[in-house]
Image (cartoon, coloured by chain):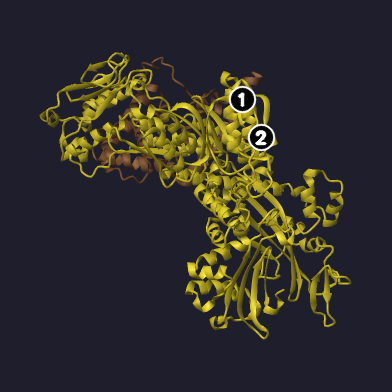
Chain colours: A yellow, B brown
Amino acid sequence: MMSHYTQQDLTALASGELIGWQAWRLRAHLRRCEACQRDYVATASLWKQAQELSAEEAPAGLRGRLDAALVGVGVATPTVRARGIGPAKLTLVAAGAVAAAAVVVVVSQRALVTQQPEGTIRKSPLRGLGSGAETQRRLVHDPLHSPNTTADRPRHLVNQPAIIPAVQIIPRGGGGARKLLPVDDIAYLNAGVHRQMGLWASLPPDEVENSLRDMSASVRGGDDFVSVPLPRLASREASAIRASLAAYRAEKEIVDTRLVRKVNVAVKGMAFSDLCKELAEKTGIELRAGKSVADDKATLFCRDQPLRDLMRQVTLVFGFSWRRSGEEGKYEYELFQDLRSQLLEEELRNKDRNEALLALDGEMQRYQKYLNLTPEEARERLKSASPDEKLMLDNLGGVGWGPAHLYSGLSGEEMTTLRNGGTVRYGSIGRGNGSPLPPGTAGGMLDSMPGITFDVGPDGQVRAIGNIKGGQRPQDVPGVKVGGSLQLVEQELGQMSLFGATEIGAGPASMSMGASLAVGMSPSVRDPKNGVANAKAAGDPALQPAVTVEPKTVIDASSTAARADRCTTADVLEALHRQSGVNIVADYYTRLYPATEVTVKGTKLFAALNRLADRMRFKWTKDRGWLQFRSTGFFNERPKEVANRLLERWSASVKEHGTLTGEDLVEIAQLTDAQLDSASMAEGARVLYGLKQWNLAATGNFRRHWRFVGTFGTPQRKALWEGKAISFESMALSQQQWYFSATMGQRSDLGQARLEDMRGSTLEVEYLPATGAGAETTTAAPEAARDHLMFTYRYGRSEKGPYVMQVGHFFARHGPLNNKE
Amino acid sequence: MNVEDRQLVAAIQAGEPAAFDTLYQRYAGRVYAFARRITASPSDAEDLTQEVFVAAYRGLPSFQGRSSVISWLLGIAVRRQRDHARGAAPYTVPIEEGDGQEVPGPSADALGIRDAIDQLDPVYRVPFLLVAVQGLTHREAAEILEQRLGTVKWRVAEAVKRLRTVLQTDHQEDSEETDDDVSLYTARPYRACER
């Protein structure tokens, strides 16, 4: 019988305080238990409603009363007058022609200023202390509240000249006067930068809102600035404080009129470093991209737009900020990503990984209703299965049967191991001991490998396992053992795969067969649902005209034949801009789509946007005549994207040498795993830049060997390219250690290996890229047209000579040297 | 305490006049909303809010920053209100219930829940307000209320359970036009936080 969670658990989850495995487990339970799910939905909904009550607008008169009360606490002192500040010095801030003005008032103890309904200023010693008579009485008679005693003053004010707090008087109606103030460039450019990131993100809203609420708090407080921090005061001396505050205010009020210069921009997937350079040349204003964003790419199309607007759109889409430096008239601007934005991105990545894990778990839960089937029954049912069921029944009819059962019974600890990238093992076969198999699964696992037989010698020893003609069925072999393993692999950022293996063995012989059980990807990233998200814009007159978007397709640079069926997101947006004339700002990550899937004809712009954006995994929104596009999984795609400057350099090398050189491949292998694991980036590198040997560096099989080669100096690498070997003795200690662990360290059959055994070992690399038409790096290509790559490690000694480890296309093997073909 | 709050407190402690203004703008709405739910009238809430900020101004020089600023402010509010209840001082009768100004308020659902919260026994209401409404952690609420963490967790959960019952009942009443008695949750004036 399924047990239920308590209200306390559900409340803890709704509050966000239940984290880690406990939260994960509860969420997994919610997927299965309707009753708890119902309770949780009600609790979460209640929680959300409750949060709406967190703040109310404080009564209008409260601020004035508080100011008066603070004076009573002893903030204003005669010292102020002695310094020459008058009893009621008023400073009018807002434009004179407008009645509703923001007034900054400095008050003394004799002239208390309180807010009046129309925004006027009245002097009254205690007026406005509130309607609560009790409070009024306390404030007047309570000695603790009596003014002007040094003892009552806050400790930090006792030994220094008093500073009078500025009282801001803002007319009712909320900041009408504030709007009349000139908006500073930086405030305008960076407005809502973190809030906007939340719009692009695909997280549960409460999480995002919490993060953003916390972040936006930093930009409150009477000013609109984001990148002008509160002054850091090194001294408590009053004049220093006043000076720094004055500088702070002055910095806030800068408006650079040069930024209204209009620009025309049409760039596709251009790096910000290049974009800023181009804009700087066009406008004469110094713009640059900081290191943190220099390689990020953007797609921009606009006509006659003020530079200021363009810069602002960039911050809104990317979550980056502009920083100003220099002197008046020569201000310089630098685009950068602040730490807060970086952390938010990281948080989004973590949350998305959890979503992907949950999606994968959801996939695995679908197996539940078939777990009562034997492998044979599953095979039988597969014959008439719907497409939706086929993959599952196929797995259950084969070697996936055991792992699927093992997954359903994982303990919390085992699940944690899986999530952390470890392998969970059951049974005692092969490498080490695993947990005991759950009762009743061993028989089923044996049945899940129907074709497997054992070759048993006359002495009863198992010589081989496989599809051996005339071999014995596992069930008939004495001492046969079965086991299984599960492994969770993040194939690329945002995509989780669960692999399971069934193992069988007797004595020293064993065999393992695996299956991919399920793949999990965050559903919100996969399906942005733009129609729903932008429902409010459905009636926008600007989005009603019918458009036809037919993107120009790219030429496959890796092939001599034009493959006119693929296009990038930038190609689609370019076509959209040409058709609609709307200004466009978008991020750019390498993704290619069949042209037919991103073409719309005679469709309303609103519907076209939804369809195209959904297909290209974009979220779109409209802001002041601009269409903004942000990739739904930008936080995962950003680490995968390779800089244009690198791709262009390798592309130039291909043009020069006709192929990627060994040096290029060494360099490519130095990219991060996230970049090299990305399938879309690999496709883009081949199709857009002609780097057809990309996978020779990127595949896990070769990557670590290229990286090892990269640790050698240029002369040694040059020797390798000339077909010469590098000797073990000439390697540095760290290189020798790597070499040893990659070769001898992998050979359990050689017993206790020693460093002396490595004497005379060598490394060779054979790289013969295929050139000419039809050259491909695939097994399907003809042998002559294939790239040839082989890492050869000759190491140790056997009776027949040194051992050899060769790592070539799609294989890696160890053995005596004479086994080499 | 987050970085912004830390900077803010440091600025106030350094005597920067605009910083207290920022503190007020940042938290007055939340303190007032909390005060509204634990006092009998808007004017009491206004008084309590004012007291909180006056006390905060006086206490800031010695504020160690071991808790968040909002947690500290709400703690002051709870203690002040508890003191008032103990002193049995009569509350002033509200003279004005509002200034008639329309401001964007919470959704209809939230209004429903507001009434339901007001009906809760303070024993459950105050922990719920601190955790669910104001977003404090259970631990912060436990420290403010000087209660055990487990007690606070249980009371918040119990409040949720009761609110769900009341809201469900309300919805049923709306739809079925019945007069089901929900006297279990009738409004009672707030007296003191249970220790």
For residue A451, side relative to residue A580 (left or right): right
Q: Is residue A224 visible?
A: no
Residue position marked by numbered label 1 in the rendering: A606
Q: Position of residue A473 (x, y in %)?
A: 85, 69
Please tell me in which quadrant of the rendered image residue A141 appears. top left
- Judged from this view, the residue extending furthest toward the right is A470
Question: Label 2 neighbourhood size at 10 Å, few (<14), some (14-19), many (20+)?
Answer: many
B169, above or below A271, in the image: above
Question: What residue is shown at x 41% (from left), y 16% (from top)?
Answer: B101
Q: Is residue A610 visible?
A: yes
Question: Label 1 neighbourhood size at 10 Å, few (<14), some (14-19), many (20+)?
Answer: many
Q: Secondary structure at mark 2?
A: helix
Amino acid at the residue labelled 2:
Val
Q: Looking at the image, which is closer to me, A486 or A260? A: A260
Q: Are marks 2 and 1 on the same chain?
A: yes
Please tell me in which quadrant of the rendered image residue A325 appears. top left
Q: Looking at the image, which is closer to me, A706 or B117? A: A706
The quadrant in which the N terminus of chain B is found is: top left
The quadrant in which the C terminus of chain B is found is: top left
Residue position marked by numbered label 2 in the rendering: A598
- Judged from this view, the residue extending furthest toward the left is A82
A94, above or below A570, in the image: above
Q: Position of residue A154 (x, y in %)?
A: 22, 37
Q: CA distance from mark 2 to mark 1?
A: 15 Å
> What chain does mark 1 sit on?
A
First in sequence, mark 2 or 1: give its number: 2
For residue A690, side relative to residue A298 (left or right): right
Amino acid at the residue labelled 1:
Phe
